[in-house]
Amino acid sequence: QVQLVESGGGLVQPGGSLKLSCAASRSIFTFNAMGWYRQAPGKERELVAAITSGNRPNYADSVKGRFTISRDNAKNTVYLQMNSLKPEDTAAYYCNAHWLSVTGRVDYWGKGTLVTVSS
């Protein structure tokens, strides 16, 4: 079993910054990719950013140019630097790791960290 533990959420004013961290209980090299998803009240969970084992990132259009995903393989940790935060970024943010088995995709999730953007 894999454990993913998020940290770094909180309350921030519009235009501010936060950095989320996701620490994995085993080497993140074992995953095809890791990512951050978010879910706002009354909305579906959506992909925010992901990074492959080859260090290739991709972002949702809504966060391009504002958010940066990165990984530290030595620390088994993935980060999400969030700048120029907007009220619409308010959501619970979840760390995800997945790998592709012969039977399909296997996903692991953290418990989430809350980000609130408000003045």
Image (tube, rainbow, N blue to C red):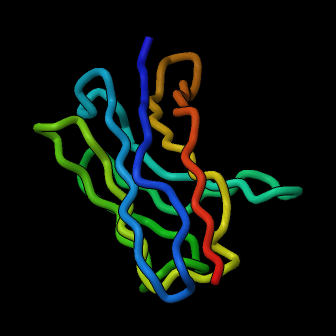
- Relative to residue 73, is residue 68 drawn left or right? right
- Image: 119 above or below 37: below
Front-lying residue, 68 or 107: 68
Q: Quadrant of residue 77?
A: top left
Q: How many marks?
A: 0
**Residue at the extreme left:** 74
- Image: 87 above or below 24: below
- Relative to residue 70, is residue 87 drawn left or right? right
Q: Residue at x 27, y 21 (%)?
A: 26
Front-lying residue, 26 or 40: 40
Q: Position of residue 54 (x, y in %)?
A: 24, 50
Q: Residue at x 61, y 74 (%)?
A: 117
Q: Position of residue 10 (x, y in %)?
A: 51, 59
**Residue at the extreme top:** 1
- Image: 80 above or below 2: below
Name the image quarter holding the N terminus.
top left
Q: Position of residue 30 (x, y in %)?
A: 29, 27
- Image: 57 above or below 75: below
Q: Residue at x 39, y 43 (%)?
A: 33
Front-lying residue, 63 or 15: 15
Q: Position of residue 79 (x, y in %)?
A: 32, 55
Name the image quarter holding the C terminus.
bottom right
**Residue at the extreme right:** 42
**Residue at the extreme front:** 119
Q: Residue at x 57, y 52 (%)?
A: 93
